[in-house]
Amino acid sequence: EDQVTQSPEALRLQEGESSSLNCSYTVSGLRGLFWYRQDPGKGPEFLFTLYSAGEEKEKERLKATLTKKESFLHITAPKPEDSATYLCAMPEGGYQKVTFGIGTKLQVIP
Amino acid sequence: DTGVSQNPRHKITKRGQNVTFRCDPISEHNRLYWYRQTLGQGPEFLTYFQNEAQLEKSRLLSDRFSAERPKGSFSTLEIQRTEQGDSAMYLCAVHRGQAGELFFGEGSRLTVL
């Protein structure tokens, strides 16, 4: 069964303190890996799709990378407004549905 | 703005009552999904529609749950005889993109007292 595991479950950073979130996966034939951001009380907001090992995508202070076993979401010099839950997900069943990890709750302290 | 509108945003009900949530995508999308999310967990798949046909249902979708998409546009999710364990955020999403990316609405939060 395809699985997505995220770590850590929670992360507290000082403003400007760079770090990385991890998403490890087990799947027979990766068809893409997604990152989402979710603010409290709202739906997930799509950030990136990574299709193959070695691929990188960037958006402002966020950079997502992909290897054959895991993906990282690197946060460079975070700001308080980056505080959110970051979800990793991947398609399964021939793109018919998406399976999510439990997320990493990031708190950035001023 | 993902172009997916959900109503109501928050519903408080007593155990045993029926509730209905509605999802309205602004533009046409063949695939529409319902997910459920409880506190501290990621979204969990409930069901999806290809146009008006409901093609897959999760085992999480008990017989108290029913979803419809009568004209292939908006969709409703009804929960009958609500239980406290139904308290969650119910998320609607549409499918776009090469790899099947989902774009979500703001969600409907259900609180069962």
Image: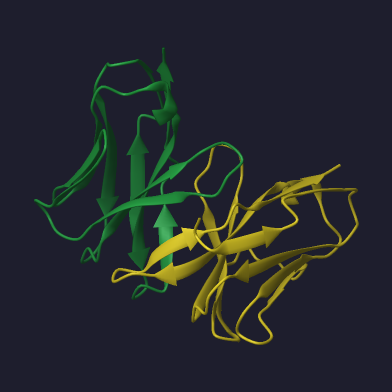
Residue sitting at 87 percent across and 62 percent down? B18
Horizontal side of B78 relative to B42 (left or right) equals right
- When asked about the image quadrant of residue B100, the answer is bottom left
**What coloring was used for the rendering?**
by chain
Q: In this orientation, which residue lies closer to the viewer: A2 or B30? A: B30
**Outermost residue toward the left in this view:** A54
**Chain represented in yellow:** B
Point out residue B71 in the picture as x, y percentages from the top left corner. Answer: 66, 87
Q: Which residue is at 73% across, 51% downward?
A: B86
Q: Quadrant of residue B22?
A: bottom right
Residue A50: x, y in percent? Answer: 22, 56
Is A105 situated above or below A87? above
Front-most of residues A38 and A105: A38
Using the rendered image of the protein, determine whether residue A1 is visible from the camera's viewpoint: no
Query: Quick one: A38 or B1, which is closer to the camera?
Result: B1
- Residue for point 57% across, 71% down: B26
User: Does residue B8 appear in the picture of this structure?
Assistant: yes
Above or below: residue B68 compared with residue B2: below
Residue B23 rendering spot, x and y as whole percentages: 65, 67
Task: From the top left corner, tell me how far across and down residue B5 is, in percent.
Answer: 63, 61
Chain that is coloured green in the picture: A
Q: Quadrant of the C terminus of chain B?
A: top right
Left or right, residue B99 beside residue B48: left
Question: How many circles with numbers are drawn on the protein?
Answer: 0
